[in-house]
Amino acid sequence: MTTVHLVNDPRQAAMLAAPLRQRILEALAEPGSASTMARTLGLARQKVAYHVRQLEEHGFVQLVREEQRRGCKERIVRRTAQYLVASPSVLAPGMDPRKLKDKFSSSYLIALASRMAQEVGEAQAIAEKAGKRLPTLSTDLEIRLRSPRQREAFAGELLEAITRLAAKYHDETHPDGRTYRVVVGAHPIRPTRRKP
């Protein structure tokens, strides 16, 4: 089972949007048959089997083994990926951050996040096919800033630090070098309620 499957085809995304298919995929984290899933989901076996075949034809479910039961073969299947991620281009052409002028807008941050999901999903699929890990770096933190002035000061220092680090480590000419895209973003979040 791969970790992430990036869904690029709008028809496949529409097929996966059906709640029953989502429930079947969730149940197939562990191998199972149409019969066992039908019992788990409380549905007719034929209905579940139809949807399992559709998911298998599109590569979201794969055969694990066949077992002989009561004179017929029962197909044991499981989903092919732990997570399904819809590509930003599924609904429309993806947002291109280069076309947005306001680098401090929420639209620009969404465009960066969309491009990152697309690029990392594609790179993850290539790495898994090659049997390798995809080297990435990420962190996530929350910071509470007192005022817009503090926010501007923090942003200025952060950008300065990143620019300094990039200049220190960037090597355009090394033959074994690998290019990485660094994305830094910040957005307001709903405050979490403090426990009494």
Image (cartoon, rainbow, N blue to C red):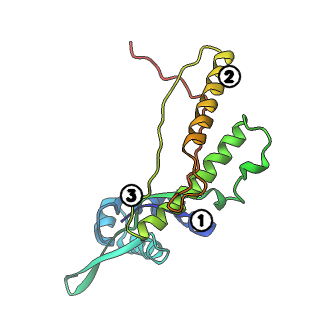
Name the residue that disc number 3 marks: 26
Taking 75 as reference, is 57 left or right? Answer: right
Quadrant where the image shows the N terminus: bottom left
Q: Nearer the viewer, residue 154 or 97?
A: 154
Provide residue 22's location: percent of width, then percent of height: 46, 59
What is the distance, in whole Å, between disc 3 and disc 1 at their CAs?
A: 20 Å
Name the residue that disc number 2 marks: 152
Q: Is residue 188 above or below residue 9?
A: above
Q: Nearer the viewer, residue 163 or 49?
A: 163
- Disc 1 residue type? Asn
Q: Which comes sooner in the sequence, label 3 or label 1?
A: 1
Quadrant where the image shows the C terminus: top left
- Disc 2 residue type? Glu
Provide residue 173's location: percent of width, then percent of height: 59, 57
- Disc 3 residue type? Glu
Q: Which comes sooner in the sequence, label 3 or label 2?
A: 3
Label 2 Cα neighbours within 10 Å, binned few <14 / some 14-19 / many ≥20: few
